[in-house]
Amino acid sequence: MRCGQALNAALHEVMAEREDVYLLGEDVLDPYGGAFKITAGLSDRFGGRVTTTPISEAALIGVATGMALRGLRPIVEIVFGDFIALGFDQLLNSATKFGAIGGGAPVPLVVRAPMGGRRGYGATHSQSLEKHLLGIPHLRLLAASECHDLAAMLRGAVDDPGPVVLIENKLMYGRPTRQPVDGWIDEFACRTTGGPWPALTLSGNGFGPAAATIVAYGGMAPLAIDAATELVLEHEVFTEVVLLGQLLPLELDAVVESVGRTGALVTAEEGTLTGGIGAEIAARVGELAWDALRGPVRRVAARDTVVPAAPALEAAMLPQASELVDEVLELVGARTGSLR
């Protein structure tokens, strides 16, 4: 099953099981079924519980916040994640604050946001803006990837008593799911933390000696795996890859544990570099595992500019697997003096 199909099936299951789940979004009604077809079939099946809305992300999140306060479980689809900026005030000053200032009133709201580039959509439809949500207290920020159980991730978000933003990389929709099977993802041994939004740690040599840890999430997950594969095949360098499912609250136990084994860390994100999630991870790991690090944390991210539409320019602006390979080799060379 492809990831888009898995998310669609999960929405059908959740809405069938819970009559308090409602879906709001732009152009989500059949036969269109949303810009990426993740809501296909829902309006035909669930009628009045699926609402197509005017083009106003602030209104979408504001109305859904009111529904959540009344005891419903609304799911909001942002047609392109870039436009979550238009609903930022409702997230920052309403949905995430009412529980804190209202005596603990639950606000069980889920916002789904397709993020990311590599499709030539240009500057306003290709961004990865999740770093701008990282500083909002009382928000849960999740990042889906093809290696995670997408149904469990969505179900956990719906069951959460507070507001949740689920980031879904657009390229992921068309990719097959790659969940762990008997402790393996393809040729990588896999360890997982608990809960519906686990961190997955992958190793190409059964968690034997490794030169570095690569931490990634969402759309960078396949690129991190590709980089780890190239490092083994072309350079005989083993790494561990940690794929985060939850970005806020930022839980880094799996990263710290891996860094304790490898002594080096490279972060990977599709958002722009300055003020990025990689910077926060680097700061936290510097506090929690400074004695394990044998070199500086390296960060791989998009350039600090807008996303071009031309394919060659877009590829030059966005991070690539080859950059992760280069950063790991630089770290290994700095440690051993034997490479580069």
Image: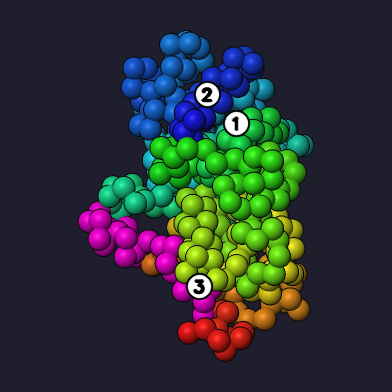
Cβ atoms under marks 2 and 1 closer than 8 Å: yes
Question: Nearest the camera: 179 or 50?
Answer: 179
Up-down: is 73 above or below 223? above
- Asked whether 329 falls inside the magenta stretch, the response is yes
* Element type at mark 2: helix
The percent coordinates of residue 279 (x first, y second) are 57, 68
The answer to whether any part of residue 58 appears in the image is: no
Q: Badge 1, how many Cα within 10 Å: few under 14, some, many 20+?
A: some
Q: In the image, what residue type sits under mark 2?
A: Ala
Q: Which residue is mark 1?
A: 151
Q: In the image, what residue type sits under mark 3?
A: His
State the extent of the magenta-drawn residues as a range. 305-330
**Earlier sequence position, callout 2 versus callout 1:** 2
* Element type at mark 3: helix
- Asked whether 285 falls inside the magenta stretch, the response is no
The numbered dot on residue 244 is: none
Q: Which residue is mark 3?
A: 235
Question: Nearest the camera: 196 or 109?
Answer: 196
Q: Residue furthest bottom?
A: 337
Q: Which residue is mark 2?
A: 9
Q: Badge 2, how many Cα within 10 Å: few under 14, some, many 20+?
A: some
Q: Within the image, what quadrant is residue 242 found in? A: bottom right
